[in-house]
Amino acid sequence: MIIGERIKLLRKAKKLTQTELAKAIFVSYQLVSKWERNLSEPTAEMMFTIIDKYQLPFDFFLDPVTQQTQYTAKEVILNAFLESMIASYDKRPTIKKVAQVASLEPEHVALYFANSDELIYEFFNEVDRNIKIEIEAQIVSHHDLMTIFINNMAPLLYDKRVQLHVLYTRPYIKGIWLAFIKSKYKRIFLAHHQVDEQEGLALEYLIEVLTAFISVWLSQPNPEPLAVFQNRMRCVTGKPINQWL
């Protein structure tokens, strides 16, 4: 199912007109109409806005893939996208550039990704997929987010330090990535734990602090070893979340 069809189904499920949906996400109804008629597609940032607004799964806009050849082709393209971003500090790689790095024709890449926004969207989900699964499993049974972050999440981040270094250092993608992870992990926690107003504020502070720590850590050309980073976190954040206020 293509993106426009998903947006249309979502709108009808919420019993919204195109104008009502447009107002909710701060765009024109003409743009929503173009999406639904497949004349244009939302940006990666707009897809995340829709996901956050309507509490959708983060893979809502991804088509289910069943054939191994499709997995392989997408993996090649996503790896080429990463290589292209590594080579380009301040300019987002085009489909043409990604195709060149992947040794594919642009038309071949377009079978899977119509534009770089779709590439960004799936790249985010690919980088975060295993991290999200592990962290959600821990959050279900534990309240102490700092312990989960230090003991469970930091090792997963370190394993993906090459991809994450790019996401935290490329200006054309960093802002979208930060919005993606802040929204995602806040929603995961709130889905499994009830919090009052003060705890909610503490959670906001915690997410901002953790994001800042990760950004500094993984923005370095050679991030400090995992054990050093974990010890640093234990020293700086020695109090549990309910004592932050």
Image (spheres, helix red, strand yellow):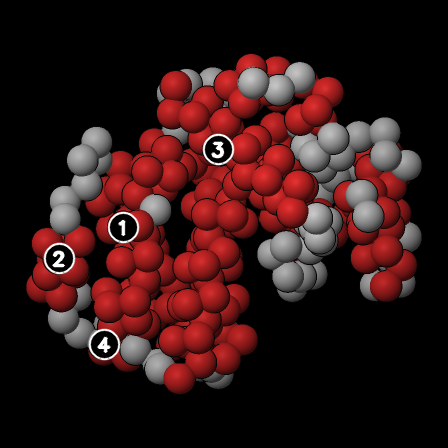
Q: Which residue is mark 4?
A: 240
* C-alpha separation, residue under disc 4 versus residue under disc 1: 23 Å
Q: Amino acid at mark 3?
A: Asn
Q: Quadrant of residue 216?
A: top left
Q: Looking at the image, is mark 3 or mark 1 nearer the viewer?
A: 3
* C-alpha separation, residue under disc 3 versus residue under disc 2: 28 Å
Q: Is residue 237 visible?
A: yes
* C-alpha separation, residue under disc 1 versus residue under disc 2: 10 Å
Q: Looking at the image, is mark 3 or mark 2 nearer the viewer?
A: 3
Q: Secondary structure at mark 3?
A: helix
Q: On screen, 115 above or below 227?
A: above
- In this rendered view, identify the residue nearer to me: 70 or 26: 70
Q: Which residue is mark 3?
A: 79
* C-alpha separation, residue under disc 3 versus residue under disc 1: 18 Å
Answer few, some or many: residues within 10 Å of disc 4's Cα (few below 14, many 20 plus, some between 14 and 19). few
Q: Quadrant of residue 202?
A: bottom left
Residue at 19 percent across and 41 percent down: it is 223
- Badge number at residue 227: 2
User: Going from the N terminus, do you reach mark 2 or mark 4 first?
Assistant: 2
User: Going from the N terminus, do you reach mark 3 or mark 2 first?
Assistant: 3
Q: Is residue 54 left or right of residue 74?
A: right
Q: Secondary structure at mark 2?
A: helix
User: Going from the N terminus, do you reach mark 3 or mark 4 first?
Assistant: 3
User: Going from the N terminus, do you reach mark 4 or mark 1 first?
Assistant: 1
Q: Amino acid at mark 2?
A: Ala
Q: Which residue is mark 1?
A: 158
Q: Is residue 29 left or right of residue 151?
A: right
Residue at 33 percent across and 57 percent down: it is 156
Q: On screen, 92 above or below 131?
A: above
Answer few, some or many: residues within 10 Å of disc 2's Cα (few below 14, many 20 plus, some between 14 and 19). few
Q: Secondary structure at mark 4?
A: loop
Locate residue 70, reporting x and y percent.
67, 41
